[in-house]
Amino acid sequence: MEIYYEDAQITLYCGDCKDTMKVLPDSFVDLVLTDPPYTKDTFYSAYKTLATESPRVMKQGASLVTLVGQYLIEDVVLLFKDKLKFNWIIWMNQPGRHIRMALGIEVTGMPNLWYVKSNKYANIRVADGFSVKGTEGIEKPLHPWQKDLSWADYFIQHLTKPGDVVLDPFCGSGTTLVSAKNNGRIGIGVEIEERHCEEIVRRLNG
């Protein structure tokens, strides 16, 4: 684990978030926003790390929002049980090309599971569905898991205020960090592959 890039607003670590999150300070994050890799081989470890390590670094009342494939919702909810309070599911509609699953379902978007570090529901006015505005989530020019900037903007703008700290433990192409910078938040990111860290820095300074 090492700090790969740092400026007044953004800190990017190059390493495995399983190790990196263990050394982050307690109770300093206002929002964990991420899209973990949820392939058959990686999903359990990724979501287990997210559920285990996030509560400690989150402030009281902070939110965690994670994308998850519909077929994994039951497994992921079990991993988060007794870790954070489940708040709601917010649907991200992806206009344009839609994939069709083998069982015949046309996938028009994805659920975001919203958790809070609290013993009660978050008192935040927000719609439980939105449509992304770009095409990066379909075309994925920078990363196989890339999401539209408007996905990150939606949650950062609704669940945080300027100056708040946003953490993405699975940075990928850096969409969360770019949104945090654009919206005047402090961004902390972790990415395991150096080649993707290089791309993230280019996006941040582009």
Image: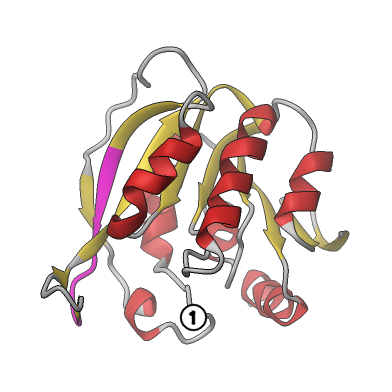
In the picture of the structure, the residue carrying the numbered disc 1 is: 144
Res. 185 visible in picture: no
Residue under the point 46% across and 29% down: 81
Quarter of the rendering containing residue 78: top left
Residue 120 left/right relative to 26: left
Q: Position of residue 96 (x, y in %)?
A: 18, 79
Q: Position of residue 165 (x, y in %)?
A: 63, 39
Residue 68 left/right relative to 117: left
Quarter of the rendering containing residue 114: top left
Q: Position of residue 129 (x, y in %)?
A: 21, 48
Nearer to the camera, 15 or 136: 15
State whether residue 188 is above or below residue 96. above
State whether residue 133 is above or below residue 186. below
Q: Is residue 128 magenta?
A: no
State whether residue 190 is above or below residue 103. above
- Amino acid type indicated by mark 1: Pro
Q: Quadrant of the N terminus?
A: bottom right
